[in-house]
Amino acid sequence: MHHAVARLAEVCDEIVVVIAPDAPAPSLPLGPRIRIARDESEGQGPLAGMVAALRSVTTTFAIVAAGDMPELQPSVLVMMLGTVADGDAVALADGSDVRPLPCVVRVEPAAEIAPAVLGSGRASVRALLDQLRVTAVDEPTWTALDARRRTLFDVDQPGDLA
């Protein structure tokens, strides 16, 4: 998580780290730019964390990423922020699919829609993006900044770190 926070800190004015309701606060370089938010209930997944974070965000746009994404590329994140323009969200194309994380969302519509999506039974970041006007950045554009595609890398198992 420290790696993801460090990468986000390169491009974000504020960072909100969401943790479980009863989890101890992680050791982070807490300060005016990094805050802790808590999920309302345990085990509801990334969309629930996003709902908790969006409640405390003071910016117009938010980059949404997972704590297990240690190699987010700041150049890709900056490009995504510059692409959001008139839409509600930006995500990265991956083949014929669009990856839900990382994404950039316009905070106001995402914060309004996300709780209903969370309660709908299709409680995922992808389901939220389905409700927003999303610009998908094509692979040639974002991989020109990240040829090794490390922005999409996430750590699911300890072996993934090798």
Image (cartoon, rainbow, N blue to C red):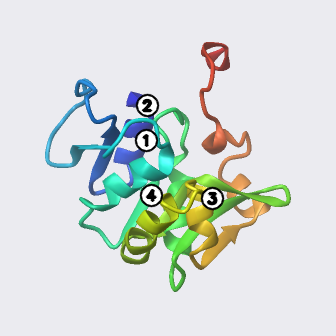
Q: Position of residue 49 (x, y in %)?
A: 40, 47
> Sequence-wise, which precedes: disc 1 or disc 4?
1
Above or below for 25 versus 113 = above
Task: Indicate the amino acid at tag 2.
Answer: His
Assign a secondary structure to mark 4.
strand
> Sequence-wise, which precedes: disc 2 or disc 3?
2
Label 3 with label 1: CB-CB less than 8 Å: no
Q: Quadrant of residue 103?
A: bottom right
Please give the residue where the numbered disc 3 appears in the rendered image: 126
Label 1 with label 2: CB-CB less than 8 Å: yes
Disc 1 and disc 2: Cα gap in Å?
6 Å
Label ID, residue 152: none
Q: Nearer the viewer, mark 4 or mark 3?
A: 3
Q: Quadrant of residue 97?
A: bottom right
Residue count near mark 2 (Cα–Cα under 10 Å), binned few <14, some 14–19, many ≥20: some
Between 144 and 150, the one nearer to me in the picture: 150
Disc 4 and disc 3: Cα gap in Å?
15 Å
Task: Indicate the amino acid at tag 3.
Answer: Arg
Label ID, residue 7: 1
Q: Quadrant of the C terminus?
A: top right
Label ID, residue 63: 4
Disc 1 and disc 4: Cα gap in Å?
11 Å
Assign a secondary structure to mark 2.
helix
Above or below for 64 versus 128 = above
> Sequence-wise, which precedes: disc 3 or disc 1?
1
Above or below for 91 versus 9 = below
Residue count near mark 3 (Cα–Cα under 10 Å), binned few <14, some 14–19, many ≥20: some
Above or below for 92 versus 111 = above
Q: Residue at x 55, y 36 (%)?
A: 71
Disc 2 and disc 4: Cα gap in Å?
15 Å
Disc 3 and disc 1: Cα gap in Å?
23 Å
Between 47 and 26, the one nearer to me in the picture: 47
